[in-house]
Image (cartoon, grey):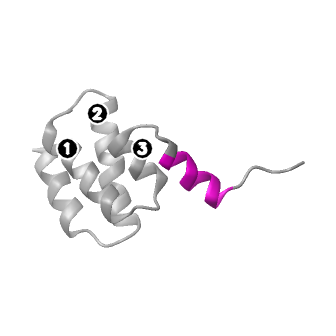
């Protein structure tokens, strides 16, 4: 049931915080073993595709990737001091 709700929210939620909630729900359900089904993974991928500059959603959908790191470093460059 959680997967179906996450999938629906990934399709209809507005940009920003509402879509981020899809990522948070997917992350928590997988991390704590409540769900790890393909529908939940698809919901995470769908919302990450819509929010391509959101490193957290990218992480939830695809794990740690070079693209995720690039997004983070573009927003928060390493200090030079």
Left or right for 59, reference 78 = left
Residue appearing at x 54%, y 55% in the figure: 71
Left or right for 69, reference 56 = right
Q: Quadrant of residue 59?
A: top left
Residue 58 lies in the magenta stretch? no
CA gap between label 3 and label 2 equals: 13 Å
Q: Residue furthest bottom?
A: 14
Residue 72, percent across and down?
Answer: 58, 52
Residue 23, percent across and down?
Answer: 34, 50
- Pointer 1 or 2: first along the chain: 2
Residue appearing at x 49%, y 48% in the figure: 68
Residue appearing at x 33%, y 45% in the figure: 61
Image position of 6 with respect to 66: above or below: below
Q: Which SS does the magenta portion mostly show?
A: helix
Q: Which residues are magenta?
A: 67-76
Tag shown at residue 30 = 2
- Answer few, some or many: residues within 10 Å of disc 3's Cα (few below 14, many 20 plus, some between 14 and 19): some
């Amino acid at each position: 049931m959680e997967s179906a709700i996450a999938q629906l929210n990934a399709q209809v939620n507005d940009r920003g915080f509402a879509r981020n909630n899809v990522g948070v729900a997917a992350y928590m359900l997988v991390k704590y073993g409540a769900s790890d089904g393909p529908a939940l993974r698809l919901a995470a991928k769908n919302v990450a595709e819509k929010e391509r500059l959101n490193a957290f959603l990218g992480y939830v959908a695809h794990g740690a990737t070079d693209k995720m790191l690039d997004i983070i470093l573009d927003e928060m460059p390493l200090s030079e001091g």
